[in-house]
Image (cartoon, rainbow, N blue to C red):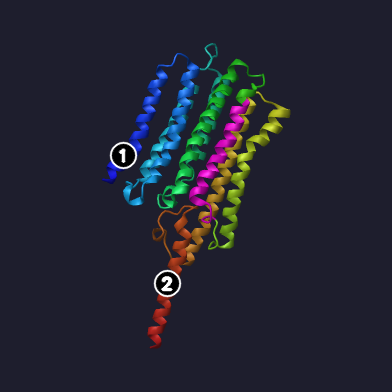
């Protein structure tokens, strides 16, 4: 029965969207079709809330790993379209010489860096926001939607800047391309921080049980991510505004910025993982006792504390038996 009920709550809004799209096809102008498309999109977003009207025992359990993989596939399509657009020769009169390959390599690096930033840190199914609560699950879902829009805008800006490397390599890029690239990168970073906070933040990392060294490292990671979201704006208001805003300079700055963010984040993650490894060795644990050692694993610190407490209880019990 709950499968039929859940299917009804999912399929009925889907059928309404199909009807709206069919209605849009019969509109006599593109402006009217665009209005219908916006209405259908907003209804699709709002209809996600309908499932919350069901009680927990009435809903079909969600396979979190499979569901998040489906969301990732949409992101990979956006990246794939961007790569497909730039590997083709963008300007028919351009010759495949050094400038061509430099522009191609630089643009591919920017897209690859965005992919690394996207999938570098992912929560385990046990720690995921979808399992944490319904509120965090909805926040995660809607922020993912917004992030995909920002990714699309940033990829369009990158493709336009790549094209301008051949059309007008010595001229400043136009304001629309600049805004798409800069604001797209900033909003992507903001959405990444928010998405990670739903699984890792709000009392989980850092928390009161963390040793001081780990607490400060985790707090520093959050502070750095907040700073990274403002970094594109700082580059825009300094280098692009007063130094140079040619396509090559813009792509080089974005590439260096993403490289810097990835390196610092990787360094912080390894430092935290190293601190956890030291705690595990002191507690007499192996990595198998807590599973995969990730620097933002919700269960790692609690597992170490539980393991140490159990070990102390066993020692105390042995001493009591010896005394008896």
**Residue lying at 51% horizontally and 35% vertically, measured from the top left:** 146
Q: Please give the name of the residue rendered at 48% of the width and 39% of the height, measured from the top-left corner.
A: 142
Image x and y of residue 150, in percent: 53, 32
**Can residue 161 be seen at all in this image of the molecule?**
yes
Q: Is disc 1 surrounded by few (<14), some (14 to 19) or many (20+) residues within 10 Å?
A: some
Q: Which mark is residue 238?
A: none
Left or right of 108 in this view: 124: left
- Compared to residue 237, the image places residue 35 above or below, namely above
Instruction: State the CA–CA distance, disc 1 to disc 2.
Output: 48 Å
Most common secondary structure along the magenta stretch: helix
| Image position of 309 with respect to 112: above or below | below
The residue to which callout 2 is attached is 311
Please tell me in which quadrant of the rendered image residue 237 appears: top right
Residue extent of the magenta highlight:
178-205
Q: Residue drawn at (47%, 52%), measured in percent from left and top?
A: 294
Mark 1 or 2, closer to the camera: 1
| Residue holding disc 1 | 7
Q: Residue at image x 51%, y 46%?
A: 196
Rendering quarter of residue 171: top right
Packing grade of label 2 (10 A; few <14, some 14-19, many >=20) is some
Camera-side residue: 124 or 44?
Answer: 44
Q: Residue 114, percent across and down?
A: 52, 35
Image x and y of residue 73, in percent: 41, 34
Q: Nearer the viewer, residue 18 or 163?
A: 18
Position of the C terminus by quadrant: bottom left
Disc 1 + disc 2, Cβ < 8 Å: no
- Name the secondary structure under disc 1: helix
Question: Along the polypeptide, which appears first: circle 1 or circle 2?
Answer: 1
197 in magenta = yes
x then y, percent, for residue 106: 56, 28
Disc 2, SS? helix
Q: Residue furthest left?
A: 1
């Amino acid at each position: 029965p709950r499968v039929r009920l859940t299917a009804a709550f999912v399929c009925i809004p889907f059928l309404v969207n199909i009807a709206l799209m069919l209605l849009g096809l019969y509109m006599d102008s593109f402006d009217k079709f665009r209005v219908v498309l916006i209405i259908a999109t907003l209804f699709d977003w709002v209809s996600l809330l309908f499932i919350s009207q069901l009680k927990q025992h009435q809903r079909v359990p969600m396979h979190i790993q499979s569901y998040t993989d489906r969301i990732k596939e949409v992101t990979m399509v956006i990246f794939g379209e961007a790569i497909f657009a730039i590997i083709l020769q963008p300007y028919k009169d351009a010759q495949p010489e050094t400038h061509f390959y430099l522009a191609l390599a630089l643009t591919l690096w920017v897209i690859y860096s965005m992919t690394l930033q996207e999938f570098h840190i992912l929560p385990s199914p046990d720690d995921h926001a979808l399992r944490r609560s319904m509120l965090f699950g909805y926040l995660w879902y809607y922020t993912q939607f917004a992030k995909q829009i920002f990714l699309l805008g940033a990829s369009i800006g990158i493709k336009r800047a790549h094209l301008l490397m051949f059309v007008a390599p010595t001229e400043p890029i136009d304001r629309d391309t600049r805004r798409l690239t800069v604001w797209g990168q900033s909003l992507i970073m903001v959405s990444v921080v928010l998405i990670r906070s739903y699984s890792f933040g709000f009392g989980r990392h850092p928390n009161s049980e963390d040793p001081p060294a780990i607490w400060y490292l985790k707090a520093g990671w959050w502070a750095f991510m907040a700073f990274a979201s403002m970094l594109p704006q700082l580059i825009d208001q300094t280098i692009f505004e007063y130094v140079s805003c040619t396509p090559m300079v813009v792509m080089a700055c974005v590439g260096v910025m993403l490289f810097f963010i990835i390196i610092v984040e990787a360094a912080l993650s390894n430092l935290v993982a190293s601190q956890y490894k030291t705690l595990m060795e002191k507690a007499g644990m192996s990595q198998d006792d807590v599973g995969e050692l990730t620097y933002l694993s919700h269960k790692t610190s609690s597992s170490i504390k539980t393991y140490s407490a159990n070990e102390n209880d066993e020692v105390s019990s042995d001493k009591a038996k010896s005394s008896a």
